[in-house]
Every structure is written in structure tokens, then in C-alpha cells.
Image (cartoon, rainbow, N blue to C red):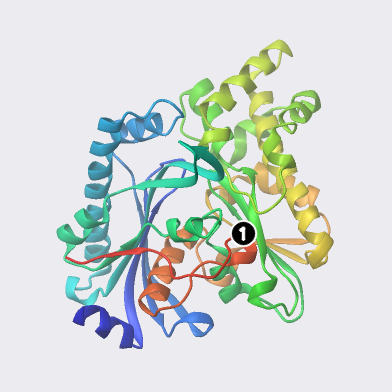
Amino acid sequence: MQRLLALHQKKEKLIIGLISGTSADGIDTALVRIAGSGLHSKLHLVAFETYPYPPELRERVLAASLPGHGSVDEICRLNVAVAECFAQAVLQIIATARVQKHEVDLIGSHGQTIHHLPYAEPIAGVTSRGTLQIGEPSVIAKRTGIIIIADFRAADMALGGQGAPLVPIMDYLLFRSNTQTRGLLNLGGIANLTILKKNGALEDLLAFDTGPANMVIDGLLQKLYARAYDENGTTAARGKISQELLQSLLTHSYFARPIPKSTGREEFGAEFVARLVQHAQKLHLNHEDMVATATALTAESVWQGASLLEQSHGCIAELIVSGGGSHNLTLMRMLREKLSGAKISTTDEYGIPSDAKEAMLFALLANETVSGNAGNVPSVTGASAATVLGKICVP
């Protein structure tokens, strides 16, 4: 308790943020120096690395994430195995940055999402919604000797929220503008879009998951080419978009749902990819055409989401992109074509490496928690109130 009180009173902290996204590519690990808290927070990225999972572990995580496939014994063991990898990532970034372990004040860990059920349904007569991130924080705390805050989504969901997206508070902190309306787009496995109204307040924020970003594209590359992803979008660039297939994909019920909303592998994972391939084969499309159409699905659903938010917040003057999808040149070209009225840039141009942004977010959220500040934005998640997020584990 004394350590937590000391952290609460400390004006500047060195915090490690951890996340492995829905694609389970590896553990994004950011060492961040944060001064202050709340809307007065100042962030400085000290070091960032991505540490891949062992291939077998990644395969088992992805398999356990499929609806009806994750057994309780498998998830129980994966919870610890993932945590051991997260702990090693912490120790490695400390060594890379050449800081001493005792200098690190805190860890903020998102963990590894294996299931996300944000819509309330009854179970045994009790209404429930839930989300499951594995990577047991107690293991990470004991292996590293550092206080950790984890499981950030559950508190928001307990108040009726979606538990996602959580990044808008960081978007507002770093990118709000008094002169123009901005969109912040993160292209991970899933695409999430934040709109920052010109000269707007935190309460004016709107954000949601627009649909798949890299998830479907990566799934196709793995299924059709035995490659992890479409590097630079070169495969998509060689293909031709099938408008018939694209329009069929856009009939998925998720795209018509009202906001707030969030999604994940449950709706756009392996089963969605298998149906896409089956439909594409009936249309006699080649592999490159399938990848081009999947890439267009991301661009089209982002454009539809942006158009929806612009109705209330005004035209987006600048769209600032982050995440692995920002390296996909074909996807970025498609976004520029669809959102031709907006300047398209990346967070790198603002001093935030596009791959590091989400890991930095969980360092920020950990700082907010020990500072006693809310970390969710109810206008985004649909929660009934702002609330402090996360659970604290001490070494």
C-alpha cells in the first residue's frame, strides 16, 4: 500500500505498456516516461520493441480464440504461458533501454484478448457481457518485481460499456486541435476510428471499431500463401477488386449496428475468411483478387464509419493513422482515394511511432489508474459513467 501511495504522489514515472493485439503477432512493449496525469500528462517514448511469441504458442492462442474451440484446460495453461512471455518482454525492454529494474515504476498490461462479447445476453437468467484477456498479471508482477495494472476493460463493461475502444483518451490528449476536426485511425487486427471535433471537449469524443483492418487480409495470406501478412500491400496491388464480393462482405450485420460498438476475431476471424474464400471461388476469383477485395473491405468500412461520424462532428480535415496497417501501401492508397477531402498522415509525423501507439496507451492508462483518474470515455464505450480501470497486482 505504501508503494502505491508513493506512486500516486510521484510527479514523473517510468512505465512499461504491454499489448498483444487480435492478430497475436507478438508483444508490443513500450517504455514510456510520463509526467503529470489526466489531460496534463506529458508522454515521452524511451524505447519500443515487439517480441514475437514462439510459433506454437501463437497458433494455440489463435485456436483458443475461436468460438467453441478454447477448452478450459487449454485457456488455463495459456493464461500462464502468455504471462511468462509478457514478463520476458518487460525484462528485455529494460535491458535494451539500459535502465535499472528498480527505476521502472509500473507496468500497464492489456494482455492477449482471446474473446470479446460486448453485447449483453442472458445466461441462466442473468444478463451478462464479458471480455477475456489472458496473460496472468500476478505472474508478470512476480517475475519482474514491478507493480502491474491489468484487465482494463472489465470495469467499463461492468457499467454497461463495450470495454472498447480505450485509445480515444490518448487520442484526445495528444492530437486534439482548436483549428480542425481530426480522425485517428488505428489499423491493427481490427480498425478503430476516433473523431476529435474541432475545439471539442473530452465528452464530445466519438469512436468505435469500424470492422476488420489487417485481420481478414492476414487470414487470407496465411490461408492462401502460408505468409503472415501482405508486406507493403504488394499482393493486393496485383489483384483486382471484385465489387460483387465486396458488396456481399459489407452485408455483414456488424456494419449496420449502431454505435457504440466493438468487434474482434469472433466475427472477422477464421470462419469469416473461410466464407470469403468459398464465395470468391464461386466467382472464379484468383488469390490476388481475394486479397485486393479484402483490403478494399477495410478501406470501405473505414470510409463508411468516417462518414457516419462526420454527420455530427464535421468533415475530417486530417486522418492520422497508426498500427501495422499503416505500412500497407495499397491500403493507405485506398484510404486516400476514399477520403479524398482529408489529409492522410501517420502518428510518426507527430513523434509517435505508429507501431508503438497502443502499447503507449496502456502505460498511460496505468498512470491514470494509480493517479485515481478515470480511463474510459463513456461517450465512446457506452458505459453509464467514467471509471477508474484495471486491477492492481503487486510483486
User: Looking at the image, which residue is at 49% across and 45% down?
Assistant: 128
Q: Position of residue 132 (x, y in %)?
A: 40, 45
Residue nearest the observer in this picture, 302 or 262: 262
Residue nearest the observer in this picture, 375 or 229: 375
Q: Position of residue 153 (x, y in %)?
A: 45, 57
Q: Which residue is mark 1?
A: 382
Q: Is residue 180 above or below residue 27?
A: below
Q: Position of residue 376 (x, y in %)?
A: 52, 66
Q: Is residue 36 above or below residue 326?
A: below
Residue nearest the observer in this picture, 95 or 247: 247
Q: Is residue 112 above or below residue 317?
A: above
Q: Position of residue 304 (x, y in %)?
A: 77, 47
Q: Is residue 278 above or below residue 356?
A: above
Q: What is the quadrant of residue 386 in the picture?
A: bottom right
User: Looking at the image, which residue is at 40% across and 78% down?
Assistant: 372
User: Looking at the image, which residue is at 46% across and 40% down?
Assistant: 23
Report the quarter where the C terminus lies. bottom left
Report the quarter where the N terminus lies. bottom left
Label 1 Cα crowd, 10 Å radius (few <14 / some 14-19 / many 20+): many
Q: What is the quadrant of residue 296 in the picture?
A: top right
Q: Amino acid at mark 1?
A: Gly
